[in-house]
Image (cartoon, rainbow, N blue to C red):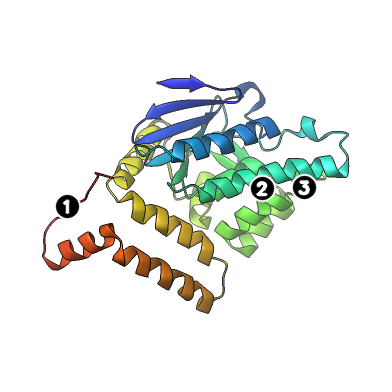
């Protein structure tokens, strides 16, 4: 079943919810309306026990060309700040919802569209997809996209993208770590759903705890990261899932999970 919202279409493809940015004529720009709707929909879908992963796609020829620049014309400083606060909230939501969020870009993913791909937990792209933080070519340095991109591709590669605004192809994006892998366009949906089904075999509690902890520790100093993760894995170990998994390993048997999720 597919539901059409103001800016999105949402398909139930359990165990996944597939959310498609649905302004194809404009190359799916991240307007404030779309960003707010997407953040709300991510939170709504993540609350459903049967949803084990969320997939983000773009309708038409592209994933997303970035912010809606028409919306940014003739605005006051406070109004511009409000737009980017909405964007920050969306990116934070992607990483805070308790299920994996998988980007499946095709065509192009530029500026904030590239930021959204970089922010997702996982990304499988079509092999014809191209990526850029191209704002500098229009006098608007991609400062906020740079936050997410630099946390994926390393400083020198990030600065290459940010300072030149050049496109990189999917093979380069995979090599640099912006995406997990690139596949032919006609195989993209099948590859993404194979990943979803793999994740659905794992315990939701463990994935949720692990995702939360990963983002908590990733930018901390090593000692603090180990403190945070020591607490997380201790809580995981004493939880019913952890105890059953440990017992199954010791007893050389398959785990017997409760509640089936």
Which residue is under mark 2?
88
Which image quarter holds the N terminus?
Answer: top left
Whether residue 148 can be seen here: yes
**In the rendering, at what x and y percent does residue 29 appear?**
66, 32
Numbered disc in front, either 1 or 2: 1
What secondary structure is marked by label 1? Answer: loop
Name the residue at the bottom extreme. 223
Numbered badge on residue 136: 3
Who's the residue at 49% across and 47% down the image? 97
Residue 111 visible: no
Label 1: few (<14), some or many (≥20) within 10 Å?
Answer: few
- The tag earlier along the polypeptide, 1 or 3, is 3
> Residue 218, how many percent across, how many down?
53, 65
Which of marks 2 and 1 precedes in the sequence?
2
Relative horizontal placement of residue 125, taking residue 199 as reference (left or right): right
Percent position (x, y) of residue 128?
Answer: 51, 37
Q: Are marks 3 and 2 in contact (CB under 8 Å)?
A: no
Q: Which residue is mark 1?
A: 256
For marks 1 and 2, give the CA distance: 40 Å
Residue at 71% across, 48% down: 165
Give left or right: position of 177 versus 203.
right
Badge 2 element: helix
């Amino acid at each position: 079943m597919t539901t059409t919202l103001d800016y999105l279409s949402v398909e139930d493809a359990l165990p996944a919810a597939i959310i498609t940015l649905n302004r194809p004529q404009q190359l799916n720009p991240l307007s404030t309306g779309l960003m707010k709707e997407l953040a709300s929909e991510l939170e709504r879908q993540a609350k459903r026990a049967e949803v084990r992963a969320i997939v983000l796609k773009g309708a038409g020829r592209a994933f997303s060309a970035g912010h809606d620049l028409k919306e940014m014309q003739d605005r006051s400083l406070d109004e511009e700040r409000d737009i980017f606060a909405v964007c920050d909230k969306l990116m934070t939501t992607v990483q805070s919802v308790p299920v994996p969020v998988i980007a499946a870009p095709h065509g192009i993913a530029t500026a904030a569209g590239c930021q959204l791909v970089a922010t997702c937990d996982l990304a499988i792209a079509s092999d014809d997809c191209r990526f850029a933080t191209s704002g500098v070519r229009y006098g608007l340095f991609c400062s906020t996209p740079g936050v997410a991109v630099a946390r994926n591709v390393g400083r020198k590669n990030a600065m290459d993208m940010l300072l030149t605004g050049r496109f990189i192809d999917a093979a380069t994006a995979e090599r640099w770590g912006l995406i997990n892998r690139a596949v032919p366009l006609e195989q993209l949906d099948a590859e993404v759903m194979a990943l979803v089904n793999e994740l659905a075999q794992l315990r939701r509690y463990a994935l949720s705890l692990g995702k939360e902890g990963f983002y908590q520790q990733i930018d901390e100093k090593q000692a603090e990261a180990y403190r945070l993760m020591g607490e997380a894995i201790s809580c995981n170990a004493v939880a019913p899932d952890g105890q059953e998994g440990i017992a199954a390993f010791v007893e050389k048997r398959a785990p017997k999970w409760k509640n089936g999720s």
